[in-house]
Image (spheres, rainbow, N blue to C red):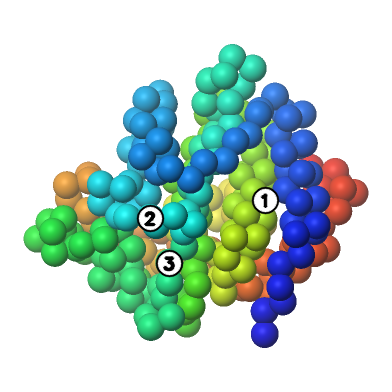
Amino acid sequence: MKGAADPLHISRFLQLYDEDAARKGITLSIGFDFHRYVSITRTTPTKGRTYPNFRPDRSIIKSGEGFWMMGVDKHNEAAVLQAVRLYDLSRSNFAEHLESLKAFYADPAKHVHPHDVCTCMSPSARKMTGKIAYHGDVWVRKDYRRKGIPRILAGIAFGLSFAMWNPDFVCALVARWLVDKGVVTQYGYSHYEEGGSILRLVDEDILDEDWLIWLTAEELKSRVDRHNRTELILSS
């Protein structure tokens, strides 16, 4: 059984990452209006187009079922971005959700191109049911890379997901090079598996072959509960 979220633990957990971002010259903010998020990402230089699962014109995110984060530099210019949403898969699993393309489109029949396809070969994805917090659309401006930003982004995603939803899983789909170069370890995910998503979305000009990375509910709660200032300083 999943334990209840402790608001005090979560506030301390989030504060550590907020303070770490501030030391790196980044001021963080959280938003819930995805129309606003897309308006920001569209005008952010060097950031690729936001995937349809975070765009309200393709995928509806109800109030309380998603959030996004922006970090700005001292000039108030975007330096980091990411988004997280909740999938209710109590009657399905993550692999089926991907392959049906419902992970990307609220109404696949309306938006899918005849040649769109998603294949999930990850065995673990078929065991992922219930409340799934999906972490994606991560962007870090070039001058802020190699500064420990992935740990901050994932920490905020973990803490808020736990506080808002206490999900059964938190997961992401990432390119293999993020696994090979250890960036996934920086994020703090415990598990990764090949074949998470082989995706083609023609109208979106998307052709991906990603790994699945994830934490279980128990692992997510443990990360929040055991975290303290000393651990963050040492890991940074």
Other-residue count near label 2 (Cα within 10 Å), few / some / many at <14 / 14–19 / ≥20: many
What is the spatial separation of the Cα atoms under label 2 and label 1, in whole angstroms?
22 Å
Position in image of residue 154 (x %, y %): 62, 50
Q: Amino acid at mark 3?
A: Tyr
Position in image of residue 229 (x %, y %): 87, 48
Other-residue count near label 1 (Cα within 10 Å), few / some / many at <14 / 14–19 / ≥20: many
**Of circles 3 and 1, which is in front?**
3
Which residue does the image show at 50% across and 72% down from the upper left?
131
**Secondary structure category for the residue under label 3:** strand
Q: Looking at the image, is 155 positioned above or below residue 165?
A: above
Residue receiving disc 3: 87
Which residue does the image show at 72% across and 76% down from the upper left?
3
Residue 44 appears left or right of 96: right
The reply to whether residue 129 is in sight is: yes
Q: Which residue sits furthest left?
A: 114
Residue 36 is labelled as none
Q: Amino acid at mark 2?
A: Ile
The reply to whether residue 122 is in sight is: no
Residue receiving disc 2: 61
Which residue does the image show at 61% across and 22% down from the upper left?
73
Residue 116 appears left or right of 206: left
Comparing 170 with 62, the one in front is 62
Residue 155 is labelled as 1
Mark 3 and mark 1 lie on one chain; the one further toward the N terminus is 3
**Secondary structure category for the residue under label 2:** loop
What is the spatial separation of the Cα atoms under label 3 and label 2, in whole angstroms?
9 Å
